[in-house]
Amino acid sequence: MNLESMLYRIPALLIAVTVHEFMHGKIAYLYGDSTAKDQGRLSLNPLKHLDPLGTLMIIVAGFGWAKPVPVNPNRFQDPRKQMMLVGLAGPLANFTAAFLLARLFYLPMPEVLSTLLGVTIWINVMLGIFNLLPIPPLDGSKIIPYFLPESMQDAWYSFEQYGFIILLGLVFFVPGFLGTVLGPPIEFMLRFVYAGLPA
């Protein structure tokens, strides 16, 4: 990744991960869990959400992650259902941000801002789709327990401890994994995001 691409990707990623993590915390708060708010994480300030390794990856590789917003499902009235909705909140926030930003895309603006806007839209869509993968610790894995029978709950939670290793293995050691799995849904969502706008 060249320097010019990095200069666009870094602010785009900061916007996307901040919106994503904020909405996790906001929905958890609405359901009665103030953990994120108590720790100062219910904020749209990117500095509140930066993860040291994730930030380094943004700079080095152009892709990274934020600190997950802390959520305590024991404070929910219906933990399985409300944890699923908290998990969905992050990706949905990214898709909403992409849709709204696309409405600005055709306003007169300097080319540098137009390019940044386009990159930010793409990053939001990509991050939302990526996080819907049902692999711990991604948000998609928070949706699975809601649909599992009680007899399989413990097995799923045991599997979660290996999720990050599995995810890294798929991303770094399975050629074309991200492009093959994420490419089609990203293209579909981008068509939806830009729907109705001038070609």
Image (cartoon, rainbow, N blue to C red):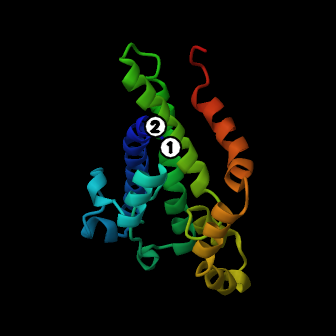
Res. 12 mark: none
Name the spot of residue 47 as percent of width and height, x first.
27, 56
Identity of the residue drawn at 42% across and 42% down: 6
Res. 1 mark: 1
Q: Are marks 1 and 2 in contact (CB under 8 Å)?
A: yes
- 35 to 59, vertically: above or below: below
Q: Label 2, secondary structure: give it.
A: helix
Q: Label 1, secondary structure: give it.
A: loop
Identity of the residue drawn at 61% across and 62% down: 140
In the image, taking residue 190 as reference, residue 37 lies left or right, namely left
Give the camera-side residue of 150 and 44: 44
Name the spot of residue 101 as percent of width and height, x first.
44, 30
Name the spot of residue 117 as percent of width and height, x first.
43, 30
Q: Amino acid at mark 1?
A: Met
Please identify the quarter of the rendering in which residue 150 is found. Answer: bottom right
In the image, taking residue 157 as reference, residue 67 lies left or right, namely left
- 194 to 188, vertically: above or below: above
Label 1 crowd (10 A; few <14 / some 14-19 / many >=20)? few
Say how many tags the image has.
Answer: 2
Q: Amino acid at mark 2?
A: Ser
Name the spot of residue 1 as percent of width and height, x first.
50, 43
Q: Give the position of the C terminus as an image quadrant.
A: top right
In the image, taking residue 91 as reference, residue 29 lies left or right, namely left
Res. 5 mark: 2
- 59 to 7, vertically: above or below: below
